[in-house]
Image (cartoon, rainbow, N blue to C red):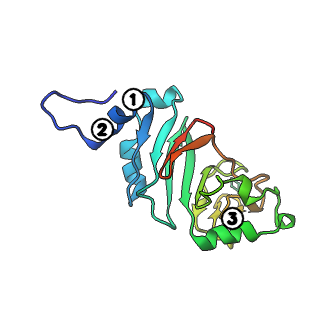
Amino acid sequence: MAETTPTAEPTRRDFLFIATGATAAIGVAAVAWPFVAQLAPDAEVIAAGAPIEVDLSPIAEGQIVRVFWRDALIFVRHRTAEEIEAAQQTPLSDLIDPEPDADRVVEGREQWLIIYGNCTHLGCVPLDFQGQYRGWFCPCHGSVFDTSGRVRVGPAPINLPLPPYEFVDDTTIIIGEEA
Ligand code: FES
């Protein structure tokens, strides 16, 4: 899987693969998108649908990064206290697809929102931090999502779904495995 030579220093990518064995690992940098793409697991691993490990430690509060699992785009959002509060304080009666924020995050780790990143209308990729709820705005037909990824303005019919994932520790998740 990793390309190493006996004389070469292992690269960060090599280390991640070596350290995690069969589990594909993804590092996330401050400038996340190009770095994630660079460190994405190889095509065979993705095609096999293997779980991917994501290191959350480089993701700053207020930042969203994108990863792929089984060809699906996933947003990993490190929410601020204000964003969490906004999500928690929203009355369910205000929601198109009523779902408490508590059901969309892990208790005690409410700062981390991990959701699929394609609009539930026709699959466009919503824009981060856009729309009146500062969640996401879908430029294709105008759907708006809040800081919990719940649809607040259609035509999207349902919330952005959650992928299966679990926390390994405070700063590591594995997407593709359910707790
Ligand atoms: S695809 Fe997002 S609103 Fe239509």
Report crowding for label 2: few under 14, some 14 to 19, many 20 or more residues within 10 A (C-alpha): some
Which quarter of the rendering shows the C terminus? top right
When the figure is inspected, residue 80 is found, relative to residue 66, above or below; the finding is below
Between disc 3 and disc 1, the foreground one is 1
Q: Residue furthest left?
A: 7
Which residue is rendered at x = 63% and y = 70% of the image? 83
When the figure is inspected, residue 155 is found, relative to residue 52, above or below; the finding is below
Query: Is tag 2's residue or tag 3's residue first in the polypeptide sequence?
Result: 2
Cα–Cα span, label 3 and label 1: 37 Å
- Disc ID at residue 21: 1
Callout 3 amino acid: Asp
How far from the left and from the top, in percent, is residue 72? 57, 41
As helix, strand or loop, the secondary structure at mark 2 comes to: helix
- Residue 112 shows up from this direction: yes
Regarding ligand 1, which quadrant of the image does it lie in?
bottom right
As helix, strand or loop, the secondary structure at mark 1 comes to: loop
When the figure is inspected, residue 102 is found, relative to residue 41, above or below; the finding is below
Callout 2 amino acid: Phe
Q: Which residue in the structure is indicated by mark 2?
A: 15
How far from the left and from the top, in percent, is residue 150? 72, 58
Callout 1 amino acid: Gly
Q: Which residue in the structure is indicated by mark 3?
A: 146
- Horizontal relation, residue 108 to residue 172: left or right: right
As helix, strand or loop, the secondary structure at mark 3 comes to: loop
